[in-house]
Amino acid sequence: MANKFGHAISKLLQLSKGYLKRSPVRPKSSFSAPNWIPGRSKWLAFGALTGGLGALLYALDASVDASHDCVHPPKQFWNHKGLLSALDKEAVRRGYQVYKEVCSSCHSLQYIAYRNLVNNCMTEAEAKAQAEQVMVKDGPDENGEYFERPGKLSDYLPSPYPNEDAARSANNGAYPPDLSYIVSARKGGEDYIFALLTGYCDPPAGFVLRDGQYFNPYFSGGAISMGQVINNEVVTYADEEVAPSGSQIAKDVVTFLKWTSEPEADERKLLLIRVFLICSFLIGLSYYIKRHKWSALKSRKIFYVPEVTGNGNGQSKGNGHGNAKAKTDEACPKHERNKKEGYGKNNYGYWKPK
């Protein structure tokens, strides 16, 4: 085995030396920069401008990250990261419980309907029961008046405040954002939300907080109006095997918010896997047809053999306009020469190399 390996290495070295010593000769019709550049100066300028703009944006983004006014959130391990990973449905159900009991008093989910919760956070009967507990303003009726009715699966989750002014008035001027797309809307995604929920601490010396503000190093500026709402045993899980610690509760609600940001994420991953498998099969089939079927037609050589008249003067039968009949029988001298040179006929009657 060692001798074979050494022999293969020596062959590769010889080939590389021969390739380096070889001086390539370009044909006259090949690419030449002096002839190509003048006709495409606009495209070159556009490419240079695009590349310079991309480099500038990257440099600006890196400088902003370096001079940010908050601590960068640490990377966490999430089970749903990766092409072959899906969201933990149990964590999504527990996260909805945390949102319902802790977060829904201030934050809304105005883009999530009760029907979206079916088979994700609860059964259809449970979703209908929760929707019917909410009175929804509907109308107008035949008399032109608005009325209230029990909620349905098609209704969206209600907001805790009727408008933005009421929300700011109840929270010392701060407006609680909607949480439907909060994970996708914040840089850092799940890591940022998890760090924000679990990163409350005492302010450093000299840091002044106004009334109703709390210190969080992961929030821009450090002063946040939302207090620490995630603590140990702030909720009680039905599953006794899952300890309701602060980090576990934060992880569950972040997983739920990831689902609200992209409810179709798992379906997209499945579709991508199917497309990859189908494309792999089609590419393999195309290569097989190209290599074993079409290559014979692409590399074939067609010989025109005029019919010999037998008058001894070397002239062929025809009217002199190139429409002489092709002779393909074995008595033709051209046939014997082709057989000697290694040519043979294919299924279509054409000569091709064997």
Image (spheres, helix red, strand yellow):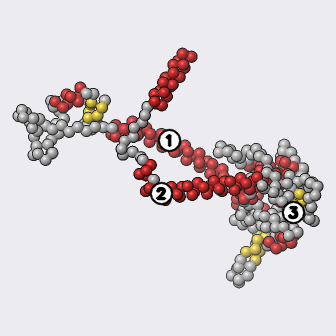
Q: Which residue is pictured at 78% across the width and 55% down the height?
A: 67
- The three-letter code of the residue at mark 1 reads Phe
SS category of the residue bearing label 3: loop
Q: How far apart are marks 2 and 1 (CA)?
A: 42 Å
- For label 2, count other residues whose C-alpha is less than 10 Å away and answer few (under 14), some (14-19) or many (20+): few
Q: How far apart are marks 2 and 3 (CA)?
A: 56 Å
SS category of the residue bearing label 1: helix
Q: Considering only vertical position in the picture, is 183 above or below 247?
A: below
Q: Residue 281, which numbered label?
A: 1
Residue occupying the far bottom of the picture: 143
- For label 3, count other residues whose C-alpha is less than 10 Å away and answer few (under 14), some (14-19) or many (20+): some
Q: Name the residue under label 2.
A: 41
Q: Is residue 119 left or right of residue 251?
A: left
Circle 3/circle 1 CB separation < 8 Å: no
Q: Is residue 25 visible?
A: yes
- Observer-side mark, 2 or 1, equals 2
Q: Considering only vertical position in the picture, is 233 above or below 154?
A: above
- The three-letter code of the residue at mark 3 reads Ser
- Of label 2 and label 1, which has the lower sequence position? 2
| Position of residue 81 measured from the top left corner of the image (x, y, whole percent) | 70, 46
| Position of residue 310 measured from the top left corner of the image (x, y, whole percent) | 7, 33
- Observer-side mark, 3 or 1, equals 3
- The three-letter code of the residue at mark 2 reads Ser
Residue occupying the far left of the picture: 311
Q: Mark 3 points at which residue?
A: 225
| Position of residue 230 measured from the top left corner of the image (x, y, whole percent) | 87, 54
- Of label 2 and label 3, which has the lower sequence position? 2
SS category of the residue bearing label 2: helix
Q: Which residue is pictured at 48% across the width and 27% down the height?
A: 17
| Position of residue 259 measured from the top left corner of the image (x, y, whole percent) | 72, 54
